[in-house]
Image (spheres, rainbow, N blue to C red):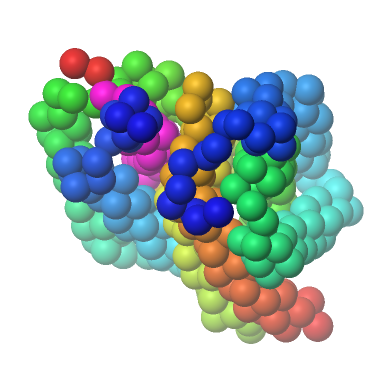
């Protein structure tokens, strides 16, 4: 029983990395919807830029919280993270291809590309953290 | 047996579910070529402006996505909740890896083809009569995407890793499966909103 109990990371001991990443992803989705609702017409980029900046700040907060974790299943985190990064990198690449193919105007394209980058990092982070939190911590 | 109780390993059925769980592949490699073919065909349809193929992908993949979400959330979910932990593990060990490939592929096919169809038909233009309905569908899909990518998919992957561990814990699997089934039900119900919007746009 003690061995079984030691395999699980107590929830309260871990920062809310996945929840913050979900919040960041939500902002990206809102920004994407905002742009998609206006393209190909004229669109004010300010709301989308603001959403992107806050999403990036949340991602940076996640990175800071993760860097403070000493007792954590880092091997499992990296194992899941790298494969998820590959999968969602391909997914983001496909979306970028569609934007380029559809001749999305340059300012919107830059913004959408940056949003895709956050998307391609956020989801692997959520997946890797969600798996690693239930595994035995490494010291 | 309580959901919180550890898995007993002294019964033959428990050992059977353990063996099934240990043999699972988190990503079923045999399915990858099928996924690759589907994605290549989607890219070809977009590049070739094949309206019929875009229509096909959007209707077929969208219908399957909706149907599977509703079926898992409203039919499989309640059944799963009443099964014993070993039975739940055995079912999950065989069911979840398939979902890892099927659902993201269906979502990509539906959204990719749908966006291109809307572009070709001029539905993306703010001047389009039902543009508001289209934006509403973006919002519904956006909410579903956040739920699926932020909660459902991580629960799915975490269950698979738990099943493959030397000592799978029934309480963790039960908790994660519950999260998976509830979120599948929520996205399934949201799919009904998508069906209403799509019917409105198509009529």
Quarter of the image with the C terminus of chain B is bottom right
The residue that appears at 19% across and 16% down in the rendered structure is: A139
Q: Residue at x 36, y 32 (%)?
A: A1
Quarter of the image for residue A29 reads bottom left
- Magenta span dominant secondary structure: helix
The x and y percentages for residue B135 are 53, 73
The residue nearer to you, when weighing A65 against B137, is A65
Tell which of A95 and B129 is nearer to you: A95
Q: Is residue B141 magenta?
A: no
Q: Residue at x 76, y 79 (%)?
A: B199
A62 horizontally vs B54: left or right: left
The magenta stretch spans residue A118: yes
Q: Which residues are magenta?
A: A115-137
What x and y, as percent, mark residue B202?
78, 77
- Residue B141 sits above or below residue B84 on the image: below
Identity of the residue drawn at 25% across and 45% down = A11
């Amino acid at each position: 029983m003690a061995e079984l109990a030691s395999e699980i990371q107590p929830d309260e001991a871990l920062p809310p990395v996945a929840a913050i990443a979900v919040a960041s992803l939500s902002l990206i989705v809102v920004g994407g919807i905002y742009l998609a609702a206006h393209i190909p017409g004229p669109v004010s980029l300010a709301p989308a830029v603001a959403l992107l900046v806050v999403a990036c700040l949340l991602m940076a907060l996640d990175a800071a919280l993760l860097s403070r974790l000493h007792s954590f299943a880092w091997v499992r985190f990296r194992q899941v993270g790298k494969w998820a990064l590959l999968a969602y990198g391909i997914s983001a690449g496909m979306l970028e291809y569609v934007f380029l193919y559809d001749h999305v105007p340059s300012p919107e394209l830059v913004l959408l590309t940056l949003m895709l980058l956050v998307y391609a990092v956020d989801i692997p982070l959520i997946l890797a953290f969600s798996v690693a939190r239930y595994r035995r911590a490494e010291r | 047996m309580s959901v919180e109780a550890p898995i007993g390993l002294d019964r033959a059925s428990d050992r059977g579910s353990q063996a099934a769980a240990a043999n699972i592949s988190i990503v079923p490699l045999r399915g990858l070529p099928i996924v690759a073919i589907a994605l290549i065909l989607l890219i070809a349809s977009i590049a070739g402006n094949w309206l019929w193929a875009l229509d096909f992908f959007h209707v077929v993949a969208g219908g399957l996505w909706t149907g599977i979400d509703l079926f898992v959330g409203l039919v499989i979910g309640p059944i799963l909740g009443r099964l014993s932990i070993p039975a739940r593990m055995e079912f999950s060990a065989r069911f979840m890896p398939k979902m890892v490939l099927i659902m993201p592929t269906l979502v990509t096919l539906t959204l990719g083809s749908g966006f291109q169809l809307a572009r070709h038909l001029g539905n993306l233009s703010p001047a389009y009569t039902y543009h508001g309905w289209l934006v509403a569908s973006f919002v519904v899909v956006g909410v579903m995407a956040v739920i699926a990518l932020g909660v459902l998919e991580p629960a799915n992957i975490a269950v698979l890793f738990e099943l493959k561990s030397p000592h799978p814990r029934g309480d963790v699997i039960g908790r994660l499966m519950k999260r998976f089934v509830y979120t599948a039900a929520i996205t399934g119900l949201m799919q009904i909103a998508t069906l209403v919007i799509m019917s409105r746009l198509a009529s």
